[in-house]
Amino acid sequence: MRVHIATDHAGLELSHHLIEHLGGKGYEVIDHGPKEYDAEDDYPSFCINAALAVVADQSAGAEALGIVLGGSGNGEQIAANKVKGIRAALAWNLETAKLAREHNDANVVAVGGRQHSVEEATAIIEAFLAEPFSNADRHVRRIGKIAHYEETGEVLD
């Protein structure tokens, strides 16, 4: 599986750890930046580029997910969710990470690097990457309604 990762300065140390850790577990990790610490960096471009790459890979039939990191993960999740086709979920424990995939078929996980130890954040991300989508009818239907709105602007009941 290909994993696209992006961060801001607050998640940079965690990002570097994850790139090495996940690469060692056989994931193909693509780093969308930043490359070096800058307390004044602007995360939206990094996160949007990672999200665009996830959509491109998935559209081409490749198995791909994304990770966006920040101090809280909130801004990074918001930025990723602006990309058509992205369902980014903020995960703060193992259960929210698993449910994001199982129920929502989230394709990007956001994690706050200042909210967890490296070990906790790594476990959350591993849980997200390992969990399959359930394909349960109710979840497929709900995701379809979100996609329909994204495409047309029409809200379905």
Image (tube, rainbow, N blue to C red):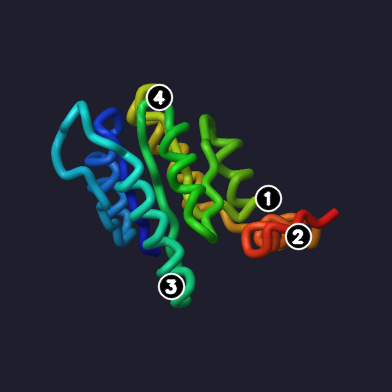
Which label was assigned to residue 103? 1
User: Looking at numbered disc 2 in the image, what kind of residue is underneath it?
Assistant: Ala
The residue drawn where x is 47% and y is 38% is 124
User: Looking at numbered disc 1 in the image, what kind of residue is underneath it?
Assistant: His
- Measure the alpha-carbon separation of dots 3 and 2: 22 Å
**Residue beneath disc 3:** 62
Closer to the camera, 83 or 123? 83
Q: Residue furthest bottom?
A: 60
Q: Are marks 4 and 1 in contact (CB under 8 Å)?
A: no
| Lower position in the chain sequence, tag 4 or tag 1 | 1
Closer to the camera, 27 or 45? 45
The residue drawn where x is 22% and y is 41% is 16
The percent position of residue 86, horizontal first and vertical second, equals 52, 55
Q: Are marks 3 and 2 in contact (CB under 8 Å)?
A: no
- Measure the alpha-carbon separation of dots 4 and 1: 24 Å
In the picture, which quadrant includes the N terminus?
bottom left
**Residue beneath disc 4:** 116
Label 4: few (<14), some or many (≥20) within 10 Å?
some
User: Looking at numbered disc 4 in the image, what kind of residue is underneath it?
Assistant: His
User: Is residue 153 visible from the viewing direction of this image?
Assistant: yes
The residue drawn where x is 45% and y is 47% is 80
| Lower position in the chain sequence, tag 1 or tag 3 | 3
